Image: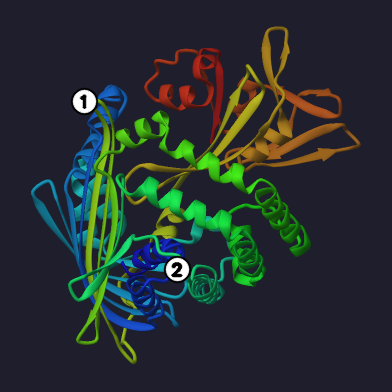
Amino acid sequence: MKKITVVLLIAVLCLTALTGCSKDEVAFYNLTTDLSQLQAYTGSGEMTIAMDMSFVTAMADETITDEEKALLAAFKDIKLTYSIKGDVTKTLSEIDLAVAFGGNKYDLGKIYMNNNGDFYFNSQKTLALLAPFISEAELNQCKKLIGDGKWLKVNMLEHYGDNIDITSLNQWAQDFVKASLNAGDKFINVVAKDYSSGLVKKSGIGYEFLLTDKNALPFIKSFAEFSINNIDAIGAWYKELLADPAMKSYIQMLGVPNVSAEEINAAIDEVVATIKADKEGALAQLAALESEDAQKALAMIEGSKLRYYIDKSAGNFNDQYEMIINVKEGSLNYFSMNIALKESYRPTASVSIDIPTEGVVDLEQVIEDNAQSRVAFIHSADCEQYVYNQSLDLFGGMTLDSNSGEIEIKMINDRAYLPLRLTCELLGATVNWDQATQQASIKTEKFSGKVQGKVINDHTYIPVREFEKYGYTVEYVTDTANPAYRDWLMSFWGEQAAQYLIIVTK
């Protein structure tokens, strides 16, 4: 939960950088700064989540599965309670978590994270949590795969590439927070020293940030006026902020193309010059914030708010986060979500966290050990092929790793021919070419020998049915109502799925 909190804090810090420097706002900002820089800590918290998507689920009722319905129902009332220990420098954490939903409580016990991005879950307690969302057969399959393993190891960075260095990533995160705090300090003490938004107020022994549908427009308008009147200082602040290496890497991580400092400064100078050239016009445009359209938009989110409270008492940081989002039009409720979080953290000199080493089941190894078949799906209408490595996952379903490209299907005398090398290699076979005899040979699990085919533009093509001789199964699917392929076909090709599909499997 600390990582969730840090993300929320960064968002709050971005907002507090806009709150000016009244006495309360500076005190609030300093507390959030101190909390975000904890290096070792213990803590506890409680989070409640309530989501109502009745309108959305009613529209999709015929297309969602029973398991998906159960998941949506669970999100109507979820409660998480936890205690946590964390070592930010070593990127280690231990959390003792309990989850309640649907009138039932599930104790997940301790969950660990190490500095390789590996998470360790109590196997049996995790299965108990999953049970309402999977079939009995799938649950039994999971139990069989896990066996006597006490801990289930899952690498959360596995699908982000092999070059993830968690130590470097952790250092970057700390540098990013430091850069954000430095920027916030300068904004409050230099740029916005004479500005106060009124969003932060003293509350009891702490301070509260509150943004609602009622004060959003006044805040946006007041800050816009301040920004226009202080555009030179804000432009200089942005130049310094975007020159920081941590900020540059963050922007690149968001997918923004790499640009030089000169280009960034030139763009900022252009914005500053444009606003200064028509300052009165820019101020006049703020009237649009009170237009009828703006009021209608606010009416659709009536009752929505973002609240963050923080105090420090007896050495503990105590914070509360609340987000309410309502989206409606008249009497029609589209969506509502209410998230509430209460936490308490105590800084410590160090913490002891023992990552499990015995009875660990590696999920990735389970998937690899239970790999099923390689399947090539070849769609004749647009000559696209989709190849999937199909393997069992922990939940009894199938994980599909795709590799898509193009393949040309030749129609000769009303027979479909496929390129031998490409199709066989996609299915894991070995293909060789004898230049002297101008003949191809292949080796599969069930066949090894020469292959007769038609050479077209230096490529050997063979009839689809010929693949059956080499240990493969060939199926033509022409009926999209086929339950095994209907949803998959329609998701890729829509109505085009009615055209025949050739499936070649090992």
Marks 2 & 1, CB-CB < 8 Å contact: no
Residue 376: horizontal and vertical position, in percent?
57, 32
Q: Give left or right: position of 392 versus 280.
A: left
Disc 2 marks which amino acid? Gly
Distance between the alpha carbons at the discs numbered 2 and 1 = 46 Å
Residue 498: horizontal and vertical position, in percent?
51, 12
Q: SS of the residue at dot 1?
A: loop
Q: Give left or right: position of 104 versus 66.
A: left
Residue 321 falls in image quadrant: bottom left
Residue furthest front in the image = 280
Ranked by sequence position, the earlier of labels 2 and 1 is 2
Disc 1 marks which amino acid? Ser
Residue 299: horizontal and vertical position, in percent?
30, 34
Q: Which residue does the image show at 47% across and 39% down from the upper left?
A: 287
Q: Count the marks.
A: 2
In the image, 175 versus 222, the foreground residue is: 222
In the image, 132 versus 435, the foreground residue is: 132
Residue corresponding to mark 2? 117
Residue 96: horizontal and vertical position, in percent?
22, 71
Q: SS of the residue at dot 2?
A: loop
**Residue 103 visible in the displayed image:** yes
Image mark for residue 331: 1
